[in-house]
């Protein structure tokens, strides 16, 4: 087995420290690829920064992750007031379903196509972690911006409940190059407060939240959750969600002794014309206590409704399939 050229070139240039991962057994479930073990990346100042532990992935992901770490993450850490000494890796290649849920689709980790960053070790001994809002806000914002520019999927705190302590990035292939970027920058602080004070009615304000305090964190988390379920994030491979119940037409149809909605017979089957099945009697006379469909002249029998008084917006609005956020 030979290391792919793109990774071999970076090793030869001294841009990364990497080797072939020979301990993995090819899995028919996760597919076959040449696994590369990335152990360190070289920064612009010449220092070689280790990954703890090493990140194992296919070469394409190795190249993308190494470039992100050296070109974006290290400068962002420096701007936030730290000197990067190591990058903590939460997960890389792992032949498993999404979020480790049995029966779920294969994770991009199982394809060697994803890396999770858990935090940073600094030269003065400090450790900045994604968990519990441990990253400075300026660093969070810079990380999110650079990650969402470079990768197909970015999931962090506030995205789906599975990424509260790490940042997931991958190179998933989707139709029309659709991308996901879900990371509520305030969610980490809110989660940390709730865990520290489980009995509190509202999370305490964090140093990153500013004057708005916990209420802004809670509102931001709610907006991110709503956006996650939005139709604009639909993925073609996902199954469509059911149409909402309780539409205006359903409410109208429930009036007038359970008269079915316009254009359907008593069995819910589409009927020809505008008359309900069995409404007209022989000789063209309407049944007792009902108004003839389309009749406009003369008073209507007391306690009945005109069939044409249906809500014009009878059909329920359809929804697009939801976009999966899991890794």
Image (spheres, rainbow, N blue to C red):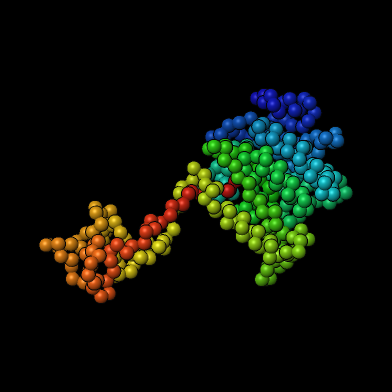
> Residue at 67% across / 26% down in the picture?
4
Report whether residue 195 is seen: no
In the displayed structure image, the side of residue 317 where residue 296 appears, left or right: left
Residue 226 position within the rendered picture, expressed as x and y whole percent measured from the top left:
57, 56
In the displayed structure image, the side of residue 235 where residue 186 appears, left or right: right
> Residue at 73% across / 35% down in the picture?
67
Q: Which quarter of the picture shows residue 194?
A: bottom right
Counting every numbered tag in the picture gives: 0
Residue 247 position within the rendered picture, expressed as x and y whole percent measured from the top left:
41, 61
Viewer-nearest residue: 228 or 196: 228
Residue 12 position within the rendered picture, expressed as x and y whole percent measured from the top left:
77, 25
Report whether residue 235 is seen: yes
Going by the picture, which residue comes out furthest to the bottom? 302
In the displayed structure image, the side of residue 270 where residue 115 appears, left or right: right
In the image, is residue 69 above or below residue 317? Answer: above
Residue 183 position within the rendered picture, expressed as x and y whole percent measured from the top left:
66, 51
> Residue at 68% across / 71% down in the picture?
200
Q: Which quarter of the picture shows residue 243?
A: bottom left
Going by the picture, which residue comes out furthest to the left? 283
In the image, is residue 73 above or below residue 241? Answer: above
Viewer-nearest residue: 265 or 15: 265
């Amino acid at each position: 087995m030979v290391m792919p050229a793109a990774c071999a070139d970076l090793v030869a240039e001294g841009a990364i420290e990497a080797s072939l991962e020979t301990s993995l057994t090819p899995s028919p479930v996760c597919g076959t690829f040449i696994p590369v073990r990335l152990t360190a990346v070289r920064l612009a100042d010449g220092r070689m920064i280790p990954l703890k532990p090493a990140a194992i992935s296919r070469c394409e992901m190795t190249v993308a992750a190494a470039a992100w770490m050296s070109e974006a993450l290290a400068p962002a850490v420096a701007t936030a007031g730290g000197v990067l000494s190591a990058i903590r890796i939460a997960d890389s290649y792992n032949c498993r379903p999404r979020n480790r849920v049995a029966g779920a689709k294969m994770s991009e980790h199982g394809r060697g196509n994803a890396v999770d960053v858990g935090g940073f070790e600094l030269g003065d001994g400090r450790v900045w972690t994604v968990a519990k809002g441990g990253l400075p806000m300026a660093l969070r914002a810079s990380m999110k911006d650079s990650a969402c520019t470079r990768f197909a999927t970015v999931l962090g705190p506030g995205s789906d409940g599975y990424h509260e302590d790490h940042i997931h990035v991958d190179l998933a292939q989707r139709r029309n190059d659709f991308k996901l970027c879900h990371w509520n920058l305030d969610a980490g602080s809110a989660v940390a407060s709730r865990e520290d004070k489980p009995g509190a009615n509202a999370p305490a304000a964090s140093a990153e939240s500013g004057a708005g305090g916990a209420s802004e964190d809670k509102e931001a988390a709610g907006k991110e959750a709503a956006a996650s379920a939005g139709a604009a994030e639909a993925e073609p491979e996902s199954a469509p969600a059911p149409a909402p119940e309780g539409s205006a037409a359903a409410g109208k149809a429930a009036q007038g002794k359970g008269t079915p909605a316009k254009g359907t017979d008593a069995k819910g089957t589409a009927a020809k014309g505008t008359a309900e099945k069995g409404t007209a009697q022989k000789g063209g006379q309407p049944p007792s206590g009902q108004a003839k469909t389309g009749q406009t002249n003369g008073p209507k029998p007391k306690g009945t409704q005109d069939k044409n008084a249906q809500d014009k917006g009878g059909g329920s609005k359809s929804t697009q399939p939801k976009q999966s956020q899991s890794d």
